[in-house]
Amino acid sequence: MESSVNAVEMKSITKRFPGVLANDAIDFTLRKGEIHALLGENGAGKSTLMNCLTGLYNAEHGAILINGDVMLFRSPRDAIAHGIGMVHQHFMLVPSQSVTENVLLGLDEPRFRLNLSHYDVKIAAMGKQYGLEIDPQAKIWQLSVGEQQRVEIIKILYRGATILILDEPTAVLAPQEIEELFKTLRVMAAEGKSIIFISHKLDEVMTIADRITVLRKGKVTASDVLVSGTNKAELARLMVGRDVLFELEKEQQTPGEIVLAIENLSAQNDKGLAALRGISLHVRAGEIVGLAGVAGNGQSELAEVITGLRRPTAGNVVVHGQSMVGERAAKVAPARVVRRIIDAGVAHIPEDRTHVGTAPNLSITDNLIMKAYREAPIAQGWAINHQKATETAESLRVSYEILAPTVETPARMLSGGNLQRLILAREISSEPKLMIAMQPTRGLDVGAIESVQRMLLAQRKAGAAILLVSEELNELIALSDRIYVIYEGEIMGEMKEAKTEELGLMMTGSRQVDSEKIDQGQRDNN
């Protein structure tokens, strides 16, 4: 039951950065025992507002009240001491340390002796309790992006926060696991804990939230909206300032020849354990083939093998009939493997857009010409024609609507959506024959998702073969011509007309034949 005292009150919060007014006199209220969704485009000011609440930033103006008391947080430690914890979209983890060490980092206990095995057991149990299984002894650098997010969720739950801020907490969960997480959040709310749920997934917001606040360009466009009194179309309009189409038109077309063939491919992960176990699949020209699976089941390793970033232990990657990687591939220096794959017309949209997809400290221009700097007109002998490079970058910035003051702006200054547009501009402008798209819409707002999906469909229409790896089942079903499901490095099955329930079963270990039997049994019982 809600208390008469609000858990959080943020009054007229204003925060500026050089040339940017990130939060413009924002009012936000979180009540005890509620789940309050915070919506907005990338760059709308959501993370900045929450960073002010958690002590990472100090607002120039405004006040923060916790349980009725005015607070001044000088650091996240102050916020944690008052029961506020946040799972950030960009993870706050130490790569060289283990999962357990990251969970315990910054806590007062243990103080003198650190019995890691004791805490390994506790953390493993917590992960199992919330459906967030993870190896407590694994180093963070060995984990996929999705697995790292699980560590962040466990870390905040371990601290026992009474006010939880969750930024895209379901991005790497299967449908059944999302249901379990939502049950957990509802129990927490019923116990009097207060939850701020930041998400771009409107279906989730409509399912889990009690109230909604919407930000656009640093201002509140709607506050204290009851879920029962709104709908997805209205929320999307409040977020992006225009109508958004939730169902994109995918033209029927006949696929062409096989562009990508994966033959009995096996590979190890960074721990030296089997990540891929004899995978075989193919992608034809002019089709989108989806790969569904919970994070950490071999998707990342598969993409890295295809693009030459990881060596397989067996099998082959064949592009247009030529073995690029594997047992039958020509033996060349590792540095040449990636160049050979790029020259074969392979484009790569990596899941980690910050550390793999871009060089954050380099300019937009430098990032956009990374695949074209060897060729005219940008290449001028052994040198780079900087005027042509700038002209090319500016043209792509305009065409792909990359919002930045100039093309000399460092890539690190871009929001997630604009960073993804930069990567898409670079990869698509190379006119790829094959595109490996890893989580291309993860963490993007509804408007940016629509834009990225349109680009993928345009490439399909142009004849490109696209392998789309995503944990967004609705996205896979909407865009894909066929869908493979991967679990623990093996293909569970292939479907042309997939349903969420069937995919969910296969994602958690049921092979296609088994899931069909389960589905038939459910229909018989009904």
Image: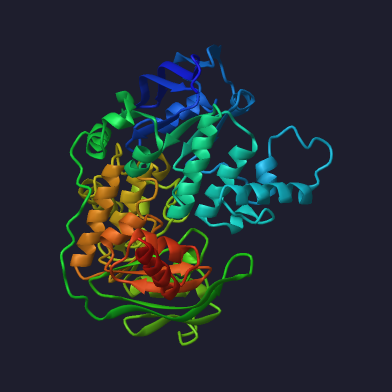
Residue at x 18% of width, y 36% of height: 242
Q: Position of residue 411 (x, y in %)?
A: 39, 45
Question: Residue 219: in sight, yes or no?
Answer: no
Question: Residue 400: in sight, yes or no?
Answer: yes
**Quadrant in the rendering for residue 425:** bottom left
In the rendered picture of this protein, how many numbered marks are placed on residues? Answer: 0
In this view, which residue lies farthest toward the right? Answer: 113
Q: Is residue 397 left or right of residue 133?
A: left
**Quadrant in the rendering for residue 27:** top left
Q: Position of residue 381 (x, y in %)?
A: 33, 66
In this view, which residue lies farthest toward the bottom? Answer: 328
In this view, which residue lies farthest toward the front? Answer: 525
Q: Position of residue 391 (x, y in %)?
A: 23, 50
- Nearer to the camera, 395 or 316: 316
Judging from the image, the colouring scheme is rainbow
Q: Is residue 516 left or right of residue 295?
A: left
Q: Is residue 13 left or right of residue 108?
A: left
Look at the picture and state if 168 lies above or below 486.
above
Residue at x 40% of width, y 67% of height: 521
Look at the picture and state if 526 lies above or below 362.
below
- Nearer to the camera, 400 or 436: 436
Q: Position of residue 315 (x, y in %)?
A: 49, 83
- Nearer to the camera, 517 or 100: 517
Quarter of the C terminus within the rendering: bottom left
